[in-house]
Amino acid sequence: MSCQEVCEFLDAYVDKELDVFTSSQFDRHLTECAACRAKYDQYQQMHDSVRVHMEYFPASEEFVQKLRAQLHQSGRRPAENIRRSWFPQWRVWAMAASVVAVLLLTAVLLRMVRRPSSSDVLAEEVVSSHIRSLLANHLSDVVSSDQHTVKPWFSGKLDFAPLVKDLSSKGFPLAGGRLDYLDDRPVAALVYKRRQHTINLFLWPSSASNSRPRTLTIRGYNVVHWTHSHMAYWAVSDVNAGDLGEFAHDLED
């Protein structure tokens, strides 16, 4: 989410009018962008101040008496006159209610159509983790091209043993590994290289047994996702889709 989008929808975010996915994008952006966070704090303070300090103006007794008198007079009119005066208004209100109902139904259907699946949300998280590792210059907690050095490093840090392969003979040398957090749990992140490109491979246990690789592109990055032997694999990089698909195939073999 860009700073311009944050400014555009900041009022809706403060009033809690956004859907869950957009709100999570807001949360992530505000965590990473100090300028937008400061603007949000100003909006929130103004919102809270208006709610606390806004004056309440009760209706005066004179106004209440006039309103009661008018209601009393209208109640004394003959029933036929009341029906004649209210029937046209009733038709207008019925038509307006129908239009509102159609608009609400359309809005709900559009939101359901646009709502991303849990897999798409997770793919966005994977790409964000890849970008953060590059920006923060924190690709590896253990730097090594030796799989027998990288794999033991995860021992005691995860509740599973990640599969670590040396694919240097295939043109994808191992560069290291680190801990990351995805899908509401700690995961292993293995770092591979393809010439000058970096490939992040995220893996963790999955309830699914096996699935064929699925390729997609998010924010200019190529992503390949598959499951094998109850392990989920997510490979992400700016390398071309063909090379990333070859990496996934070599890893499965």
Image (cartoon, grey):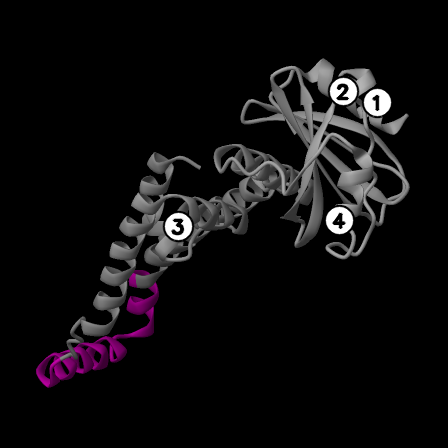
Please say if 50 is above or below 224: below
Nearer-the-camera pick, 184 or 110: 184
The residue at which mark 4 appears reads as 154
**Three-letter residue code for mark 1:** His
Residue 61 relative to residue 97: left or right: left
* In front: label 4 or label 1: 4
**Three-letter residue code for mark 3:** Ala
* In front: label 3 or label 2: 2
Cβ atoms at labels 4 and 3 below 8 Å apart:
no
Report x, y in % for residue 197.
61, 20
Q: Residues within 10 Å of mark 1 (few under 14, many from 20)?
A: few
Q: Residue at x 28, y 51 (%)?
A: 38
- Quadrant for the C terminus in the image: top right
**Three-letter residue code for mark 2:** Gly
Q: CA distance from mark 3 to mark 1?
A: 59 Å
Q: Quadrant of residue 243?
A: top right
Residue 96's tag is 3
* In front: label 4 or label 3: 4
SS at mark 1 in the image:
helix
Q: Which residues are magenta?
A: 60-85
* In front: label 3 or label 1: 1
